[in-house]
């Protein structure tokens, strides 16, 4: 039986490229939302994969490209809707935001008569979210930060928890939703969402890409969409329900002494802030035990800047 997407039929065992009109640049050039739809030969759920909702967080673009290369639509159960670049305007400009400086991931569910971000959000909701059952939304660190590959979601929901652990990144984080986000809107629509974080903005961070591809394929297997389990995870995920940033006590140059994924004790040395010549250094230590889940990659810091993101781990 055909799957109808945006009014276009996709036959069983085939894939189809679809371009949804998203708007025009001031030059008159039209921008479209590029989408690939894979419709399997057996019954199953409809899963969406989305990347670059923040236009400079491009790690999901490469993850989705590689996942599409692994999936054979002739052996697929259900339907896969891949949207590698949601914020096409920010992607072209290498910017987190849209041209009007609005954050697309604070603009959901959107409106067909609102500003550009709102219109783009509504397009995604109407054409992708509402025809899907589950979503995986790929993000990276923002503002010169990098993130350990991780899944964020509502771990109190048994099915979301099952899928998060099937994805099996180094870390899973229970997190509440934020108003205006895709995840909040999806939950209100009765959809389950895994939010992936990993790597740096404007980079195909290798560790994040590998974790994202392997995890997405494992999640698809857990959904019953594919027969192949894929590569097993290196270890079971750590779990966190409380995270916090360690902030700069003064301005200067921060020399980091920890790595992503490192488990630390309370009082552990995270780095040293000093002047350009290294004199008058001040140690920065963690107030809690946990795992390093992210940090600033720019060593030039001002007082109050976030330096290291710590996840306190569940026993």
Image: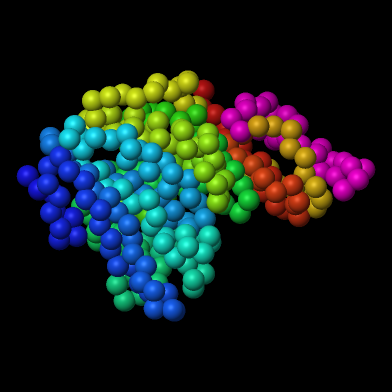
Depth order, front residue of 158/277:
277
Taking the magenta stretch, the answer to whether it contains residue 287 is yes
The reply, left or right, for residue 12 in relation to residue 146 is: left
Q: Is residue 24 above or below residue 196?
A: below
Residue 278 falls inside the magenta stretch: yes
Residue 151: tell me if it is visible. Answer: no
The answer to which of 91 and 129 lies nearer the viewer is 91
Up the image or down, 307 lies above or below 4; here it is above
Here the colouring is rainbow
The image quarter containing residue 261 is top right
The residue segment tinted magenta is 260-288
Tell me if 288 is positioned left or right of 208 in this view.
right
Image quadrant holding the N terminus, namely top left
Q: Position of residue 158 (x, y in %)?
A: 31, 32
**Whole-percent x, y for residue 29 in the image:** 39, 74
Give the quarter of the image for residue 244. top right
Kindly identify the residue that appears in the image at 32 percent across and 34 percent down. Answer: 70
Q: Is residue 238 left or right of residue 307?
A: left
Residue 101 coordinates in the image, percent (x, y): 52, 69
Residue 272 at least partly seen: yes
Nearer to the camera, 85 or 130 = 85
Which one is in front, 6 or 25? 25
* Residue 205 drawn at (x, y percent): 54, 40
Task: Kindly give the residue lying farthest to the left in the view shown.
Answer: 1
Q: Count all numbered tags in the image, as a single digit.
A: 0
Please determine whether, in this image, residue 53 is positioned above or below residue 15: below
Q: Residue at x 31, y 24 (%)?
A: 229
Q: Residue at x 54, y 29 (%)?
A: 313
């Amino acid at each position: 039986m055909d799957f109808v997407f945006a009014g276009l039929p996709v036959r069983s065992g085939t894939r189809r490229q679809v371009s949804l009109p998203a708007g025009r640049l001031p030059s008159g050039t039209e921008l479209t939302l590029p989408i690939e739809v894979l419709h399997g030969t057996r019954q199953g759920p409809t899963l969406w994969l989305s990347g670059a909702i923040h236009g400079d967080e491009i790690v999901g673009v490469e993850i989705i490209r590689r996942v599409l290369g692994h999936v054979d639509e002739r052996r697929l159960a259900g339907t896969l809707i891949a949207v590698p670049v949601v914020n096409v305007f920010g992607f072209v400009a290498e910017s987190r935001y849209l041209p009007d400086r609005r954050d697309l991931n604070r603009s959901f569910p959107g409106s067909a008569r609102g500003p550009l971000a709102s219109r783009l959000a509504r397009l995604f909701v109407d054409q992708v979210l509402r025809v899907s059952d589950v979503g995986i939304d790929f993000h990276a660190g923002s503002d010169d930060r990098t993130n350990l590959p991780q899944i964020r979601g509502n771990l109190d929901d048994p099915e979301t928890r099952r899928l998060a652990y099937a994805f099996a990144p180094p870390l899973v984080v229970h997190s509440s939703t934020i108003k205006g986000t895709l995840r909040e809107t999806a939950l209100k629509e009765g959809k389950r969402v895994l939010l992936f974080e990993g790597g740096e903005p404007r980079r195909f961070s290798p560790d994040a890409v590998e974790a994202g591809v392997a995890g997405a394929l494992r999640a698809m297997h857990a959904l019953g969409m594919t027969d192949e389990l894929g590569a097993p995870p290196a270890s079971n995920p750590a779990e966190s329900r409380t995270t916090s940033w360690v902030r700069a006590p003064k301005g200067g140059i921060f020399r980091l002494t920890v790595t992503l994924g490192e488990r630390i004790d309370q009082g552990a040395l995270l780095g040293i802030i000093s002047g350009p010549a290294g004199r008058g250094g001040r140690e920065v230590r963690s107030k809690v035990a946990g795992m390093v889940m992210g940090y600033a990659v720019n060593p030039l810091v001002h007082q109050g800047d976030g330096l290291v993101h710590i996840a306190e781990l569940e026993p």
